[in-house]
Image (cartoon, helix red, strand yellow):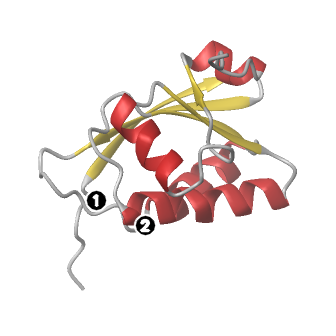
Amino acid sequence: MEHIAPAWHLEVERGPGCLFVQLEPSPDPLPDWNGLAEHLWSLLEEQFTYRIVLDMQQVTMMDSTLIGQLVMLHKRVHNRGGLLRLCRLSEENQQVLKAIRMHDRFPNYSDCEHAVMGHRPTLPR
């Protein structure tokens, strides 16, 4: 059976009780995100933690496959009493989440530290 490399790369750093993961898509304009949730879940289990912060700065456009992978991972993490937080989403990606009404499930944090601490983004008045 032929092994196909994923269309993304992860930079993983272990923090206190949490994994910090920088998501780096391939240069392909339409990266294939299939398998991302399973891969991240495996990393969490290996590290015996169910808290993860995904740095999304390098993701130019979230498509339905990526959002589906995030939803699957969120459900698994939530069922284990953990948390999944996103940080450094582009304005366009924030608008995508808002358009599909997922912005409450995946609020955007300005950086990893704010994501860990749970500081909600400042909301306009």
- Residue 120 is situated, as x and y percent measured from the top left of the image, at 71, 22
Identity, as a three-letter code, of the amino acid under mark 1: Pro
**Toward the viewer: 51 or 13?**
51
Q: Is residue 21 or residue 118 the one in the foreground?
A: 118
Q: Say which residue label 2 marks.
A: 35
Which x, y percent locates residue 115?
Answer: 66, 23
Q: Position of residue 124 (x, y in %)?
A: 62, 18
* 60 lies left or right of 76: left
In the image, taking residue 50 as reference, residue 111 lies left or right, namely: left
**Residue situated furthest bottom in the rendering:** 1
Which residue is label 1 attached to? Answer: 6
Q: Position of residue 82 (x, y in %)?
A: 80, 45
**Residue 90 appears in which quarter of the rendering?**
top left
Task: Residue 91: name its quadrant.
Answer: top left
Residue sitting at x 87%, y 50%: 81
Depth check: give the residue in front, 35 or 106: 106
Q: Residues within 10 Å of mark 2 (few under 14, many from 20)?
A: some
Residue farthest front in this picture: 125
What residue is rendered at 72% in x and 62% in y? Answer: 76
Tell me the kind of residue under disc 2.
Gly
At mark 2, the secondary structure is loop
| Residue density around tag 1, few if under 14, some if 14–19, many if 20 or more, within 10 Å | some
Q: At 62% from the left edge and 58% from the top edge, which residue is drawn? A: 73
**Numbered tag placed on residue 89 in the rendering:** none
Note whether residue 122 is visible. Answer: yes
Q: Earlier in the sequence, mark 1 or mark 2?
A: 1
Can residue 90 be seen here? The reply is no
**In this rendering, position of residue 10 left or right of residue 105:** left
Q: Are marks 1 and 2 in contact (CB under 8 Å)?
A: yes
